[in-house]
Image (cartoon, rainbow, N blue to C red):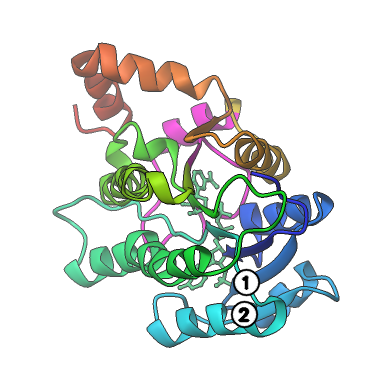
Amino acid sequence: MRIEQRVVVVTGASRGIGAALARELRKHGARLVLTARNEEALRQVGAADDVLVAGDITEAATRRRILDEALNRFGRVDLLVNNAGVGHYRSSLGAESEEIRALWELNFFAPLELARLAVPQMLRQERLPDAGEAGMVVNVASIAGKVTLPWFSMYSASKFALCSWTEGLRMECWSQGIRTLAVCPGYVRTDFQSNALSGTPPVLSAASKERFAITPEACAKAVCRGIQRNKRTVVTPLSSWALVAAARLLPGIVQHRLARINGTA
Ligand SMILES: NC(=O)c1ccc[n+]([C@@H]2O[C@H](COP(=O)([O-])OP(=O)(O)OC[C@H]3O[C@@H](n4cnc5c(N)ncnc54)[C@H](OP(=O)(O)O)[C@@H]3O)[C@@H](O)[C@H]2O)c1
């Protein structure tokens, strides 16, 4: 899908991957609607022509406001980038139920509900003259949405669900011209780990992840390439596909190794 002149909603745009994505999409000529809770941080990322919407996307009123403000300013929405998300380094049995539900509200239900507002709008509006498709939904999942990581298995489960729904939505809307893309980054150098709802990752995994770490800018470039090439999945860095393949081909060995890293085998 072309990015130039498209109206793109980016959630979690106040820092990290979302802020880098906003900058990269702007370079490609997108018209931006940026959203996150921290209004001041959002202003630092936004440019004069961007629409900025401060609010918590787990609230229905915020989600409605994002779409309304996009339509008021630009009259259309072409791309929804569901990027906002949070980590959670606690075990399934050790975490409080409320915390697990809060994780799912942000990582799964907010993207779903935003798409349920944005996709009907994409289908209602007239296609741009150079458009081959009606619109696109990009869901920023994680490598943990392809391989279950035991130090945040609740987070993994939410990202697996996000990946699965990304595929489901694509197949549901196949003939209507809605594209979907699941983005599965490995470790990206942001404050994601310190912003987790609770808990900390095992020390060993932090060291080994750092070896393969990429910058948010590199991640944003990979996402934009994926959008332009109508990809179904972007795994970044590419070397992470090796872990995905190993987990598919040798699940017992990989799971035992991951449980050892987690200190539970
Ligand atoms: N960093 C990594 O290693 C990594 C790896 C794989 C996948 N990911 C995924 O990439 C995405 C971005 O992560 P990141 O590394 O950029 O993390 P981050 O630096 O912690 O950024 C998270 C973003 O989400 C926003 N956000 C959090 N809760 C929100 C809420 N309730 N309502 C609205 N916005 C909210 C934050 O802004 P406010 O606080 O201003 O609301 C912030 O802009 C996430 O979905 C994450 O799961 C990250």
Alpha carbon distance from label 1 to label 2: 5 Å
Q: Could you say which quadrant of the image residue 188 lies in?
A: top right
Direction left: furthest residue: 93
Q: Pointer 2: residues within 10 angstroms few (<14), some, or many (20+)? A: some
**Residue annotated with mark 1:** 76
In reply to whether residue 39 is colored magenta, the answer given is no
Q: Earlier in the sequence, mark 1 or mark 2?
A: 2
Which segment did they paint magenta?
Answer: 182-210
Image vertical order of residue 244 relative to residue 166, above or below: above
Percent from the top left, x then y, of residue 143? 43, 35
- Secondary element under disc 2, as helix, strand or loop, is helix
Residue located 32% across and 68% down the image: 105
- Give the number of the disc on residue 241: none
* Three-letter amino acid code at the position of disc 2: Leu
* Three-letter amino acid code at the position of disc 1: Arg
Q: Are marks 1 and 2 in contact (CB under 8 Å)?
A: yes
